[in-house]
Amino acid sequence: MKKYSKIVALGLSCAMALSLAACGDDAPKGTPNPDSIKSDKVTQAQWEAAFDFSQVTNVSLKNIERVTVGGVATEDYGIVKFDGNKVYEETQWYNSEEEGGKPVKVVEKAYYSIGETESFEYSYDDETKTWSKEATTWYPQISSYTRSLEAIADAYTSFSYDASKNGYVATEIPNFPSDDFDTFTVKIVGGKLSVAQMDMSLDEDSTASMIFQIYDYGATSVTLPTVSGGEAANGKVSESQWNNAFSQNAFQNVTIDMTSPALQGYDPQFKIDLPNDRVYQSMYAGKPDQSGNMKMEFIVAYVDGDYHQFSRDEGKDWKYSSPASDLPVDIAASVIDLVGDFSYSAFTYNAAEKAYTADKVEANNNQGTYDSVTIKFDGARLKSIETAYSAEQSPIHIATTMTVNFSAYGTTVIQIPDVEIPDVEIPDVEIPETPDEGDNEKTMTRDQWLNAFDESSFNNCSMLMDAGDVTMRVNMDVESGRYYMTVPNDNGGIGEMIAVRESEAAYHMYSRSSATDGKWIDSGIVEQDMHEAICGSIISRLTLLASEYDNFKFDSKLGAYVHISDNTVASFKGGKLYSLTLRENDMEGTILFTDYGTTVIEIPDIVKNPEVVE
């Protein structure tokens, strides 16, 4: 049974499975003809309701790829059916090899059963004519196919009813992941989305259509094949199941709780819901009156075409924080990295404990050596990992344990707080069109080059970064421990943030945006290295260029230094790096460096202005 890779199909979803892009001449039986479907005329409220799939558990999806060349149309099909915790998937295509002068049609079918702690994929063996099943950490989810429809749900005013197409038609859709279409047609029947179709011209003689069809709402039924075996019994798994359980795909939707005596009851929780582009995290910090710790919660989620962060302190309501600087998938990867990654061969199965144990074992991701590790499985999924660690830190011996519990696989839900996401005026930051021109130095000695890219050269300066539609300003005064940042985006901007170092591991944060009526507010203490968070990765990359002196050649036409292989362009002023332009394929990003030695970051005077916006 082949494993289905993921592709972008129809431009509707970033996770359309290959099973929905199968090829063939035969349409899946029992599906309505999308061309004959006529859309109802709907209000904006009815339109938006038609795109709400949050309560949908039984539905059928079909994808059609239609290509017309010289007036002759061919169509390829794929289908997937959802019935609660059961899924049916069918693919059909033609093998490139020919048999008797004709392509060989291949049809594959698969079923999935989705449980709380483990899920199974059912496969059919043509030789034995029997079904078998094995544990899997990936299976289709409705949200993966419908997530990118959010942009269409918010674009009612971009569509107008076209009787010739039996539906609503648009030629442009704001925030849609693709603009590679001539027309986009939507059909809504009985208050439900029925068809979303993207039509485009390939050349003068050919056209293509990507048709996404949804039908049998609440009536789709899936009957699993009769099969025995495949279950992981008594907490014992195969090496393949072990590797799957520790893979990134295993943690697409899960709740993770960490407990340790060292945390003194302040145990963090993480919720990961990548199919819906959301993550949740709880942590603890000292109360302002130093009377103990308080719980803080954070959510990063994809909302209204962009990524945003929400937060709340213990006893308070959720509030909007800012557009997210890290994507949910990156945050999830960092959380999973904390879990550890252990090798199957290093462990011994203990039947009495129904667990795998190992002493003096290292994690594959180099987290150090543990005195002992105990790993338990529930079915083919991780249930818990308990680690014991000790170290000598003279004059004391430190010993502690950590238990990581996994639950709600496939059922973890993160609710978006019901708070307004503000529109923020974009700060006045602009990259000059030709930052390479000016007093650029035409000759740099090796020592001058090394000094220009030395980390200490960037202790006090301002950086303006331009990558596509996003411009970001970072001012840093390392000696004073102060950092300023603003990250406008194409949806309206986010305001400003200042970090002031209080101690080696703590920074006092200030912020302002339209949500605070343009006033600076005290955002509290953050126990994080803000130098690393704001500019550390940039500075680290710059210092790597110090060793690349021989790989840059001066281009008199550009008035700058150009890397001989990767098209990086660097220019200098006064012995300092002035601009750095990175080019990759059709993408180009520029960083402009100014105000060396003169960058000043003032701490907001909010003490005299008590109008703090909560």
Image: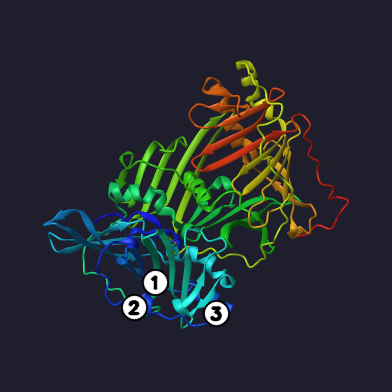
| Residue 54 locus on image (x, y percent) | 49, 71
Label 2 CA crowd tier, 10 Å (few <14, some 14–19, many 20+): some
Which residue type does callout 1 highlight?
Gln
CB-based contact (under 8 Å), mark 1 and mark 2: yes
Lateral position of residue 386 relative to residue 297, left or right: left
Q: Quadrant of the N terminus?
A: bottom left
Q: Say which residue appears at 27% left-offset and 73% top-offset.
A: 223
Please, what secondary structure does the residue beneath circle 3 have? helix
Please, what secondary structure does the residue beneath circle 2 have? loop
Q: Say which residue appears at 29% left-offset and 77% top-offset.
A: 30
Given this view, does label 2 or label 3 mark the residue nearer the observer? 2
Q: Which residue is mark 2?
A: 32
Q: Say which residue appears at 34% left-offset and 65% top-offset.
A: 66
Which residue type does callout 3 highlight?
Gln
Q: Residue 165, located in which quarter of the rendered image?
A: bottom left
The residue lying toward the viewer, choosing from 107 and 482, is: 107
Q: Which residue is mark 3?
A: 46
> Cα distance, mark 1 to mark 3?
18 Å
Please, what secondary structure does the residue beneath circle 1 have? strand
Lateral position of residue 239 relative to residue 540, left or right: left
Q: Earlier in the sequence, mark 1 or mark 3?
A: 3
Q: Say which residue appears at 59% left-offset and 52% top-offset.
A: 266
| Residue 3 locus on image (x, y percent) | 30, 54
